[in-house]
Amino acid sequence: MNEDFINKWISQVKKGTLSFIVLNVLKSGKAYYGYDLINEIKKITEIEIAEGTLYPLMNRLKDEKLIISEWVEQESGIPRKYYSITSEGKNTVTKMEEYWHNLNNSVLKITK
Amino acid sequence: MNEDFINKWISQVKKGTLSFIVLNVLKSGKAYYGYDLINEIKKITEIEIAEGTLYPLMNRLKDEKLIISEWVEQESGIPRKYYSITSEGKNTVTKMEEYWHNLNNSVLKITK
DNA sequence: ACAAAATACATAGTATAACAATGTATGTGG
DNA sequence: CCACATACATTGTTATACTATGTATTTTGT
């Protein structure tokens, strides 16, 4: 029916959320490469991040110095670019968490 | 420190959220006018919606037939444009609620 | 009585991020 | 050997939040 409007809306709601999710996955300190992140996030959350979304996103996070990247050659196969969170990234994700929490509480107040 | 990045992020996270919040306020069936909506939402949620955000938003929701509007002259003061939700709007907000719920659960899985 | 603030609407321009489409290249399974 | 999975990346499109600005009326403070 209004499938179209909902899909557009979902795309909008994802804005900001994806960077938050990515930083949270990296938060532990473990390094992930892009393709792996997409699958990992899909597995845990069922959220599908398009490749055309993820790679520019990782570059933005890098520009902001929230993550760093490193090429790692594989014994077999295509080299991978591994991303790790920085301490600035950890601080940022903590602030994000606070805001997310407040926002969700606000929404809950209104939806109930 | 990274205040700037966080502020940009917050602005992005609000995308989609504001239409969801507005529709939820209107959900009960009670009509609200724009200026009132801004204050009501601020009072309940502490979220500040800029006027330059709200009025275009209301027009979009109207174009999508999720709400209707009606001018109401006041005995004293400036006329107000009252907005009410349509049945299509109610269906839509229900679907939005579902998605929001899933998204939040996904995020919780990753943040914890 | 007058200035400032609040009420109430609206639009134009800017910036950002998600996504589809497309492209490159290597490795693997049937 | 062909299709699919792996792994990276860019370009162009679209949608929405926000700042700035504008109009006009009413209320409040001094």
Image: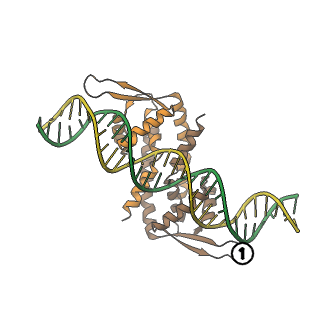
Chain colours: A orange, B brown, C yellow, D green
Task: Give the answer, above or below, for where B27 lies relative to D20.
Answer: below
* Residue B70 x, y percent position in the rendering: 56, 74
Q: If the image is split into quadrants, where does the N terminus of chain B sit?
A: top right
User: Label 1: how many residues lie within 10 Å, few (<14), some (14-19) or many (20+)?
Assistant: few
Identify which residue is drawn at 62% across, 75% down. Answer: B72
Extreme top residue here?
A: A75
| Between A52 and B42, the one nearer to me in the picture | A52
Q: Identify the residue at image location x=51%, y=62%.
A: B23
- The residue that disc 1 covers is B76
Classify residue B94 as left or right of residue C27: right
Is B28 placed above or below A89 here? below
- Please name whichever residue, A64 or A97, is drawn nearer the observer in this view of the structure: A64
Residue A26, quarter of the rendered image: top left
Q: Amino acid at mark 1?
A: Ser
Could you tell me residue D13's position as x and y percent?
A: 40, 53
SS type, badge 1 = loop
* Residue B112 can be seen in this image: no
Q: Nearer the viewer, residue A98 or C8?
A: C8
Dividing the picture into quadrants, the one containing residue A59 is: top left
Residue at 45% over, 52% down = A12
Instruction: Output the chain of dot 1.
Output: B
Q: Is residue B28 visible?
A: yes
Count of numbered tags: 1
**Residue A41 in the figure: left or right of residue B93:** left
Q: Position of residue B94 (x, y in %)?
A: 43, 61
